[in-house]
Image (cartoon, rainbow, N blue to C red):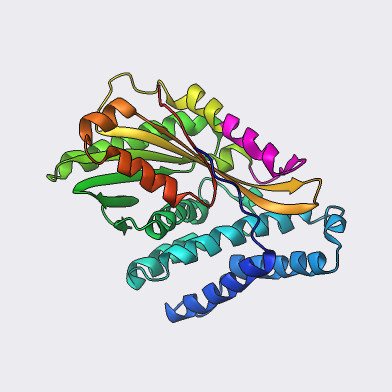
Amino acid sequence: MTTAIPQRPYAEILAELETFEGYLRTLGLRRAPDRLRDVLGRLKEIETARTRNRLPSLNKRPDVAELIWSLVEGQEFADIFRGIRNYDAVIIKKLLQKALQGPLHPTHETPVSNIGRNTVFELRLGAALLQAGANVTLGRQADIMIDHAGAHVYIECKRPFYEHSIRQNVMRARAQLRQRLDSDPHQPTVGVVAISVSKSVNPGSNMFVVNDASDLRSLSQEAERLHKQYSRDYDRLLDPRLIGMVYHLFTPALLRQSGLLIAASQVDIFPDNPSIQTMLPVSGENLKKLFLVAFRHQRFEMRDAG
């Protein structure tokens, strides 16, 4: 199943980020972090260029990479804010304090300084599920926990720094999920591994260039390649409580025909259908639909995990 990528107006993203900045102050985070101020400033430059019909000229600037990544991060924070603005303020404050850490540009990240963008990934998934109406718990038992139709669904999120570390991250997430499931007396309990491959596919130096939005389907092929290469056969001792994989890819893109700079987002879900049927014979299909609703504003693919 697939839904179209939106092309959200730059002005709309800016307006939401300015409201987000005010929300941070209500949480007691009085001084906007450097990352957010930088994103706001660069998005204003992009919007000014758009209103003056000068978007193509941005591609000639030496700091074009920073401009485009500001658009990506700006949309991420705007999407997060939409979902978490009514969530427990104490928990959200702690998570946002972590999420807003780190260098201004992803190329300057290290395995030590990437906690900020790792937390952004957790918040992004959690916010999307909250907006979809899921009963979500953040920042406690696991990265994300959903109380779904009487079942506990745990989601462990990983954001591998390199492509060759995807398999290791998947195995670590599965081990963490087993610990969560073993310690939760509630039945049924199931687990999902969520992997952001954004950093491992694009360290921050690349831009996806296509003719128009329809060509962005090739992002799904990248997720399928990574799943086949690093995740599908990572554990031959199957645990039916582990019911699937989620892949997320978020990257700047240029649509050549229109000259638009966009934040291209792709979510691919590989459900283990036999496990879902075993563990959630009544509510399994509704859980799949919940994920579809949660990511309706992105391109979405659901595939057979086998």
Residue at the image position 16 percent from the left and 43 percent from the top? 183
Which segment did they paint magenta? 203-222
Residue at the image position 76 percent from the left and 64 percent from the top? 46
* Residue 34 shows in this picture: no
Residue at the image position 44 percent from the left and 27 percent from the top? 231
At which x and y percent is residue 247?
48, 38
Specify whether 5 is left or right of 24: right
Q: Is residue 127 above or below residue 289?
A: below
What count of labels does the image hold? 0
Q: 261 or 95, which is in the foreground? A: 261
Specify whether 69 is left or right of 135: right
At which x and y percent is residue 59?
83, 52
At which x and y percent is residue 181?
21, 40
Looking at the rendering, which quadrant does residue 151 occupy? top left
Specify whether 247 is left or right of 74: left
* Residue 19 shows in this picture: yes
Q: 122 or 146, which is in the foreground? A: 146
Specify whether 164 is left or right of 66: left
Q: Is residue 66 magenta?
A: no
Q: 31 or 139, which is in the foreground? A: 139
Quadrant in which the C terminus appears: top left
Q: Is residue 216 above or below residue 85?
A: above
Q: Is residue 209 magenta?
A: yes
Q: Is residue 211 above or below residue 122?
A: above
At which x and y percent is residue 34?
61, 69
Q: 3 or 223, which is in the foreground? A: 3
